[in-house]
Amino acid sequence: MDVYKHTIEGLKLEGLSRAGTGTCIRLPELGICFDVAQGLPFAIPSEIFLITHGHMDHAGGIPYIVSQRALNNLKPGRFIMPHELKKPMNEILNTWAGIEGFEYHYDLTGQSPGDIIDFKPNLQIESFKTVHRVPSQGYILKQRKKKLKLEFENLHAEEIIALRKKGTPVEDIVLDSVLAFTGDTQIEFLDVSPQAAMARVLIMEVTYYDSKKSIASAREWGHIHLDELIPRLDTIRAKKIVLIHSSQRHSRVEVLKILDARIPTNHRERILLL
Ligand SMILES: [Zn+2]
Ligand SMILES: [Zn+2]
């Protein structure tokens, strides 16, 4: 499986995503990994693993990551997942620790959509509801930034410095949605979690791209067909939309050709394929 590397809106991103093969995408600078595929070496050093749902090609690698981190003397891995997944995953890990004959150390956190984690002093992770065949959620990364208060926007630099010296708070802390990651979902995530489409970068699944699979059959399996995304593009505010999870029925070259032919020109530039 090829691991792709991109820099999107200043953010380094590496990983792979194919329906049924594996999805694991890492932001190496932030120590964040979305889903773990079946367990791949490049993901091991991440600080936090954000699991979207329990399908094997997204979450099957959790025991591998836990085990490898232990063998490499890394801190226990921190895994965030839909709360329904926590108990069965704990049982799997206990069983596998028994098979391997050593103790696993790990931190599983079950979450519901809307839950927030303070990950770093300037970074928050918020989960959002997605629509799939099993309990699922996506994640938005929000960066805390200082922004000059509106009432001081027209002041000169010296005046602001003077206010600061007097102890007047001149800045507000704002949350900037840097990136949203959907995992597997139907197109209705845009309706139930419109905030995801407001992030600067939206990483979202589109599994099927042409008539090899109908919209109905994509929906039956909880996935998105390109024909469902195209009419929604005007409502998606993200600067860049990164498409992941294409079906193995399509080659990468074929998907790129379809995107060139089908995506309206005013949107083509902001759409990337992982
Ligand atoms: Zn999948
Ligand atoms: Zn799935």
Image (spheres, helix red, strand yellow):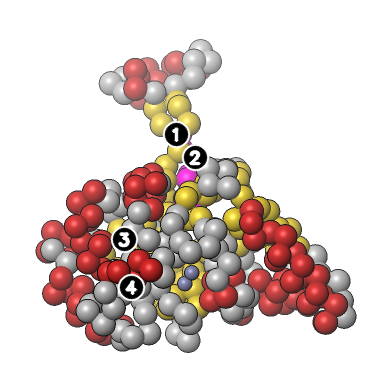
Marking on residue 144 = 2
Give left or right: position of 97 versus 168: right
Whether the residues at callouts 4 and 1 have beta carbons within 8 Å, the answer is no
The residue drawn where x is 61% and y is 44% is: 118
Magenta: predominant secondary structure element? strand
| Label 2 – label 4 distance at C-alpha | 41 Å
Which quadrant of the view contains residue 229?
bottom left
Q: Residue at label 3?
A: 241
Query: Does residue 5 appear in the picture of this structure?
Result: no
| Label 2 – label 3 distance at C-alpha | 22 Å
| Label 3 – label 4 distance at C-alpha | 23 Å
Q: Is residue 144 magenta?
A: yes
Q: Residue at label 1?
A: 174
Q: Give the percent coordinates (x, y) of residue 168.
A: 49, 15
Q: In which quadrant will I find the C terminus?
A: bottom left
Magenta residues span 139-146
Q: Residue at label 4?
A: 217
- Which is more foreground, mark 4 or mark 1? 4
Which element is circle 4 on?
helix
First in residue order: circle 3 vs circle 4: 4
First in residue order: circle 2 vs circle 3: 2
First in residue order: circle 1 vs circle 2: 2
Whether the residues at callouts 2 and 4 have beta carbons within 8 Å, the answer is no
Q: Is residue 239 above or below residue 217?
A: above
Which element is circle 1 on?
strand
What amino acid is labelled 3 in the image?
Ile
What amino acid is labelled 4 in the image?
Ser
